[in-house]
Image: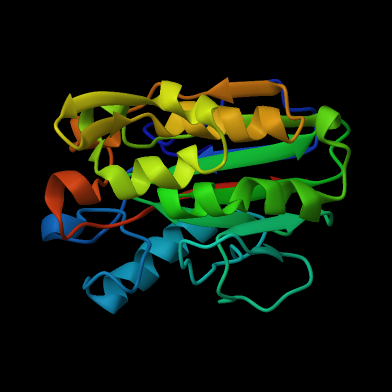
Amino acid sequence: MFPPDWIVPDWPAPPGVAALVTTRTGGVSRGPYASLNLAGHVGDILEDVRENRRRLRSHLPAEPFWLEQVHGARCARADRDRPGLAADAAAARTPGAVCAVMTADCLPLLLCDESARAVAAVHCGWRGLAAGVIEAAVAQMGVAPERLLAWLGPAIGQASYEVGAQVRDAFLAAGPGATEAFRASAPGRWRADLYALARQRLAACGVARVSGGGFDTCAEPERFFSHRASGATGRMAALIWLQ
């Protein structure tokens, strides 16, 4: 049984696929990292992070395959590569290998195939999305895209996510359809919809069955870590594995 505030994705994943997303509750960290911060690189007391990870591990079949997330487009194999690899997604085809990404406003995307043969966790910041991290994860899974299901986890909502021309231009370079995901807010400023951008990328590579979305981590600071809301803050984890 997971802690009641953690999120179990509501999606039509087949039997044999398990997934969860932690929130900021259930740990021992203090201050801006209270309480279940899972990241050791954000300034938290490392002993507290280790205890938080120990608590998470007690609910999992194995240690999560932690990545060194770099806002890129590389997808590792959680059942083959070494932990700590510089990558922003992890895929697995072996039962018990736990794919994990950490977020605090960026979009965590979970993927599985309809026959429970492959899973992936994807860290979708704007740079990674624009660079093709979703496409890399789909390719690494080795399953026809039309057989995949996707779930969009807690991320910053459009109302809270104001960006400049650099972000907008990065997506428009791939096609004019991205215009729909940006709403003008001031001269040279837009509010970006990470969920819409991810759905566009999923559709473009053939993934049609998409669930989730509708969160705003920045607007719920008591439940979610949010870098934009707090600056110094912790990280949540989105995890998926084959049973």
Q: Does 26 sit left or right of 108 as displayed? A: left
Report the residue at 48% width, 34% height from top.
153
Give above or below for 195 relative to 22. above
Give above or below for 39 relative to 105. below
Question: Looking at this view, is 18 or 87 the one in front?
Answer: 87
Q: Quadrant of residue 23?
A: top left
Report the residue at 55% width, 60% height from top.
88
Count of number-bearing discs: 0
Q: Could you tell me if residue 40 is visible in this image?
A: yes
Q: Does 146 sit left or right of 196 as displayed? A: right
Q: Does 60 sit left or right of 71 as displayed? A: right
Q: How is the image coloured?
A: rainbow
Question: Looking at this view, is 166 or 214 the one in front?
Answer: 166
Report the residue at 54% width, 34% height from top.
198
Q: Quadrant of residue 117?
A: top right
Q: Position of residue 163 (x, y in %)?
A: 25, 41
Q: Which quadrant of the rendered structure holds the C terminus?
A: top right
Give above or below for 111 relative to 60. above
Give above or below for 173 relative to 90. above
Q: Position of residue 96 (x, y in %)?
A: 75, 56
Question: Looking at this view, is 77 or 184 the one in front?
Answer: 184
Report the residue at 56% width, 34% height from top.
175
Q: Could you tell me if residue 58 is visible in this image?
A: no
Q: Position of residue 94 (x, y in %)?
A: 84, 57
Question: Looking at this view, is 9 or 122 the one in front?
Answer: 122
Q: Position of residue 221 (x, y in %)?
A: 18, 38
